[in-house]
Image (cartoon, rainbow, N blue to C red):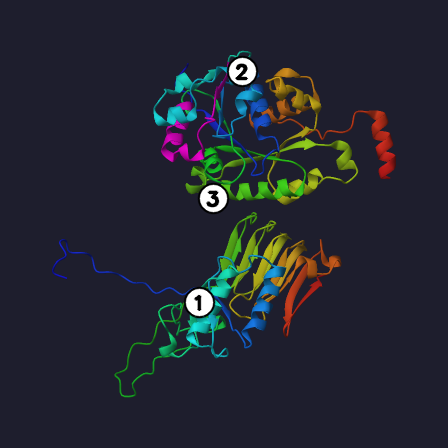
Amino acid sequence: MSSLICPRQSLTFRARSYMAFVFTPQPPIADWLKDVDATLERSKGFFAGHPVALDLSAAGLTPPEIVQLTADLAERGIRVLGIEGIEPHDAIAALPPVLRSGRGAQEHGVEEREIPEPVSAAPSPPPAPQKQEPASLLIDSPVRSGQSVVYIEGDVTVLGSVGSGAEIIAGGSIHIYGTLRGLAMAGASGNSRARIFCHRFEGELLAIGPHYKTADEIEASLRRGPAQAWLDGNTLKITAMN
Amino acid sequence: MSEGKSGRVVVVTSGKGGVGKTTSTASLGAALAHLGEKVVVIDFDVGLRNLDLVLGAERRVVFDLINVINGVAKLPQALIKDKRLEHLFLLPASQTRDKDALTEEGVAKVIAELRTKFDWIVCDSPAGIERGATLAMRHADSAIIVTNPEVSSVRDSDRIIGLLDSKTEKAERGECVDKHLLITRYHPWRAARGEMLSIDDVLEILSIPLIGIIPESEEVLRASNVGSPVTLNAPLSAPAKAYFDATKRLKGEQIPMHIPSESRGLFNKLFGRKAA
């Protein structure tokens, strides 16, 4: 604009992708909210501070009902970052922004799109070999209470212990060579083959993808020994490793 | 005061309250001074100061740390010299202000000035992980993590160790604050009966080197109540000996670790039999 006194540097935008929990409410919404309450009852503050998106494709709600739903969730400490699966004309200003480019996180890291080459194009130089970044993170010190390690790109290996109140969130598997006293969430990007291994299990919560168990739900005989967790269908299984 | 020293900054911290930070600061400070080192102990617990009481200096406080930071007083005016040990000084906290009165630049300036005048600058951290605690640890070369052998204290200590590895100046320079674990309020007979975490459990969880084990003792309480650190008030008592050993280890001496055991023979036998 001509009224600007000093010329500004042009604005730069950077795209960045974030991991968010996606809720898929099913009608009747009142029952679905009860399920949410039950989950929150078991693990208070589980969603606090984490971005949450709503996939409303199965819910069939009118805009005022969606406003009500986001308010109901806000009451439970869940703040909705965005919505997908609604008609564009339903996206009224009172609603969180509509998200369109969401894709299952398991596709992360694997770029599937290919640019089709024009048939008659002049021969182009061969593409540079793709650099294979090893998708793993090695932590050679203890992870202390209150620390959070989030590595969506792949596996996390911890040589020390993971303290009570610390958390490891990995897109792939989690390997802990010390004692796990905190929380471990593997397969956070949807990889259902991810596993959790620990040399000594005294953890507070184990999760693979959306399936989790709190310490209370885990057999006491597994504590203090080496253990692994994996997904059998939709069930989180934990066994001793001997 | 002799200038030109390059003092070592030690923070005494824990996360949890009531584990014995202030008592340990006073006892270690007095022990260092007794061994001929020139020491200043600083109370960072702005608003809830205690170190002046434990050192018996509460009736001589004129200026405090906040006054120095605000430029109301010069540093030498705020330093209180101990009546018993000529090498021991106290920089008290303000009781009327709160932790927001501590500024990062102000603390940096005070610490830098104290480094030139003392061999040891011992910072008594407030409980918690907020401003007071993070500023107390900010400039530390070493940290003494005071822990009671029970789960909540140990977890809070773990949290504090994480902060020492990330929020201190040394950590930001890519270096590592020397960390020492001081276990306080250790009950030998409770440990024997499995009512507290064992020393091994605590060391396994925190995985930092042990600098001392202070047995629970009425001597410590008695000393605090008369405003004299236990290392001065009852230097031959078990806790004072443990503090002296810890002090020597802090100075780099190799002293074998002594795990306190029950000395009251009959009691020990009775409890021992019960537990068996």
Which quarter of the figure has residue B77? top left
Quickly name the residue at label 3. B166
State the mark number for residue A132.
1
Does label 3 lie on the same chain as label 2?
A: yes
State the mark number for residue B157.
none
Label 3 or label 1, whichever lies nearer to me, is: 3
Label 1: state its secondary structure.
loop
The image position of residue A24, as x and y in percent, is: 51, 73
Q: Is A178 placed above or below B261 here?
A: below
> Chain ID for label 2?
B
Q: State the extent of the magenta-drawn residues as a range.
A: B87-114
> Chain ID for label 1?
A
Q: Quadrant of the C terminus of chain B?
A: top right
Q: Is residue B111 magenta?
A: yes
Q: Is residue A236 magenta?
A: no
Label pair 1/2, CB-CB below 8 angstroms: no
Label pair 3/1, CB-CB below 8 angstroms: no
Instruction: Residue A53: tell me if it is visible.
Output: no
Q: Is A172 placed above or below A25 here?
A: above
Label 3: state its secondary structure.
loop
The residue closer to the viewer here, A157 or A79, is: A79
Q: Quadrant of the N terminus of chain B?
A: top left
Q: Residue at x 73, y 32 (%)?
A: B187
Between the C-alphas of marks 3 and 1, the distance is 31 Å
Q: Residue type at mark 1?
A: Gln
Label 2 or label 3, whichever lies nearer to me, is: 3
